[in-house]
């Protein structure tokens, strides 16, 4: 049961972390439109190889923190307030989505798309802390165990969830491009709702249990 939950959590957490249009997503979309879907998926595959290691390092670091309550309890509290901040940030981004101008993304020409994906994904400094904090929060609710198999399954499913989102961008971006602002706005509010639930439940556990 816990192994299955590790897979579900990996898919869920990675999807939440990558679904908002960002540099990686928009690069995949642009490669798909300007070149072809296969090149975009080559880029995506390179990116998710890095995501696997980022998820593994993040959860393994969280395992160390979980084994040292002095550090982990403090970081759980910090993580709770980070989730509150993320909730507020996504609400603000949702409100601004309609008036926000689309970011221009430039792509390097004549590059090996797999290696380009590896390099671009490696520059995502947000990924390791994201996986560390989220897995720590899930472990505090007894939803996740820090045994090696659970960490590996979590990392594989995180990479798979990320690839699934990238695949959707490569496949459907051209069809939904004109609706992007509407989609971004509603996704922002949806993620704000989810992170808000996590923050509220964590606050309840911290002060009422």
Image (tube, grey):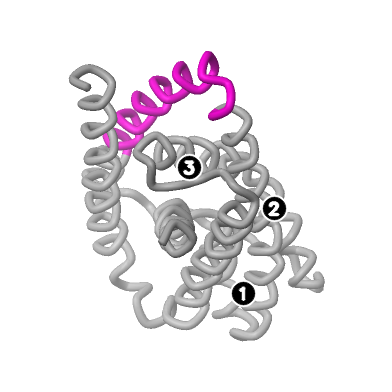
Whether residue 47 sits left or right of residue 171 in the image: it is right
Q: Is residue 75 magenta?
A: yes
Q: Mark number for residue 135?
A: 3
Image check: 84 left or right of 147?
Answer: left
Mark toward the viewer: 3 or 2? 3
In the picture, the disc for residue 107 is none
- Residue under label 2, please give it: 53
Q: Residue sitting at 66 percent across and 62 percent down?
A: 47
> Which quadrant would residue 63 be assigned to in this image?
top right
Q: Which residues are magenta?
A: 66-89
Answer few, some or many: residues within 10 Å of disc 2's Cα (few below 14, many 20 plus, some between 14 and 19): some
The mark that comes first in sequence, 3 or 2, is 2
Pick the quarter of the image with the N terminus.
bottom left
Q: Quadrant of the C terminus?
A: top left
Residue 31's mark?
1
**Depth order, front residue of 140/112:** 140
Query: Which quadrant of the figure has residue 86?
Result: top left
């Amino acid at each position: 049961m816990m192994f299955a939950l590790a897979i579900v959590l990996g898919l869920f957490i990675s999807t939440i972390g990558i679904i908002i249009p960002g540099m990686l997503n928009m690069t995949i979309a642009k490669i798909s439109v300007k070149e072809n879907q296969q090149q975009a998926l080559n880029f995506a595959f390179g990116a998710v190889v890095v995501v696997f290691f980022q998820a593994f390092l993040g959860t393994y670091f969280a395992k160390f923190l979980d084994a040292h309550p002095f550090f982990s309890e403090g970081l759980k509290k910090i993580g709770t307030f980070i989730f509150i901040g993320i909730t507020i940030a996504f609400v603000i981004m949702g409100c601004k989505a309609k008036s926000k101008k689309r970011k221009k993304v430039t792509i390097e020409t004549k590059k090996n798309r797999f290696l380009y994906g590896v390099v671009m994904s490696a520059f995502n400094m947000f990924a390791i802390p994201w996986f560390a904090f989220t897995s720590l929060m899930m472990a505090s609710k007894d939803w996740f165990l820090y045994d090696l198999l659970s960490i590996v399954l979590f990392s594989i499913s995180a990479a798979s969830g990320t690839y699934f989102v990238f695949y959707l961008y490569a496949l459907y971006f051209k069809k939904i491009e004109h609706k992007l602002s509407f989609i971004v706005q509603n996704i922002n509010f949806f993620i704000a709702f989810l992170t808000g639930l996590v923050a509220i439940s964590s606050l309840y556990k911290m002060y009422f249990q």
